[in-house]
Image (tube, helix red, strand yellow):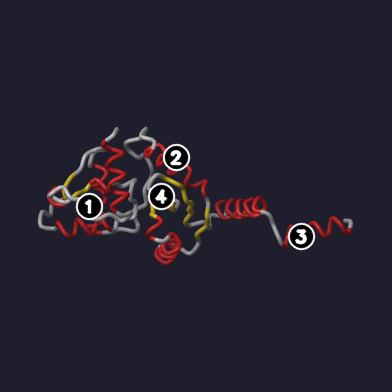
Amino acid sequence: MTNTNEAQALYELTDPTAAQLAALRGRLTDAAEGEGILDVAYTTIDTPVGSLLLAATAAGLVRVAYAREGHDAVLQTLATRLSPRILKAPKRLDAAARQIDEYFAGTRTTFDLPLDHSLSSGFRLLVQEHLPLIAYGSTESYKQLAEEVGNPRAIRAVGTACATNPLPVVVPCHRVLRSDGGLGGYIGGLDAKTALLELERAA
């Protein structure tokens, strides 16, 4: 190797380009997937309601997070609750990203994705599993939802289950409103909830 080549190799090693870093990250991700040591893969996508972080385990999509939640904080929570073996690995999220794009384009009304509900349990999980039964473009009240899951007095607990839904957009907690028609709360903020409801009403 000439001195010029050595200098170039050293330069690339100490000051890699974005393309070289991406290639290195890709090889690292492929190796981790191949060895079965990538427990949580994540990526971010741009949507009409802002950047969404998507995360998946081998079992399925486990988290959808709005930017207002703090993506770094969400990743730290996933590392604590699920596994520290987390890498940015968009390939595992390709289907989820594509279906979410289709949803915002108005060409998809339901999601067909494997979901990992390991971040929820008990009554919250019961409520969250019921949410996809609320049809696209329809809404229910917290009170109706409490009745449908067999605990009509648990209106506040239903609200908490919606507010802590780890899979917003895909698991449509935005379709749940107050009995007077008010928006109630939403993990992505009321502007995002309004945008999702308007998107579905316009279909």
For residue 98, which numbered disc appears in the image?
2
- Position of 96 relative to 12 (above/below): above
Amino acid type, residue under disc 2 in the picture: Arg
Q: Counting other residues with Cα less than 10 Å from the Cα at mark 4, is it few (<14), some (14-19), or many (20 or more)?
A: few
| Distance CA(mark 4)–CA(mark 3) | 37 Å
For residue 11, which numbered disc appears in the image?
3
Q: Earlier in the sequence, mark 4 or mark 1?
A: 4
Which residue is nearer to you in this view: 113 or 197? 197
Amino acid type, residue under disc 1 in the picture: Val
Q: Counting other residues with Cα less than 10 Å from the Cα at mark 2, is it few (<14), some (14-19), or many (20 or more)?
A: few
Q: Residue furthest bottom?
A: 80
For residue 61, which numbered disc appears in the image?
none
Q: Counting other residues with Cα less than 10 Å from the Cα at mark 1, is it few (<14), some (14-19), or many (20 or more)?
A: many
- Dots 4, 1 in contact, CB < 8 A: no
The residue at which mark 4 appears reads as 50
Q: Earlier in the sequence, mark 2 or mark 3?
A: 3
Judge depth for marks 4 and 2 and give the one in front. Answer: 4
The percent position of residue 164, horizontal first and vertical second, equals 29, 58
The residue at which mark 1 appears reads as 127
The percent position of residue 161, horizontal first and vertical second, equals 24, 57
The percent position of residue 150, horizontal first and vertical second, equals 13, 51
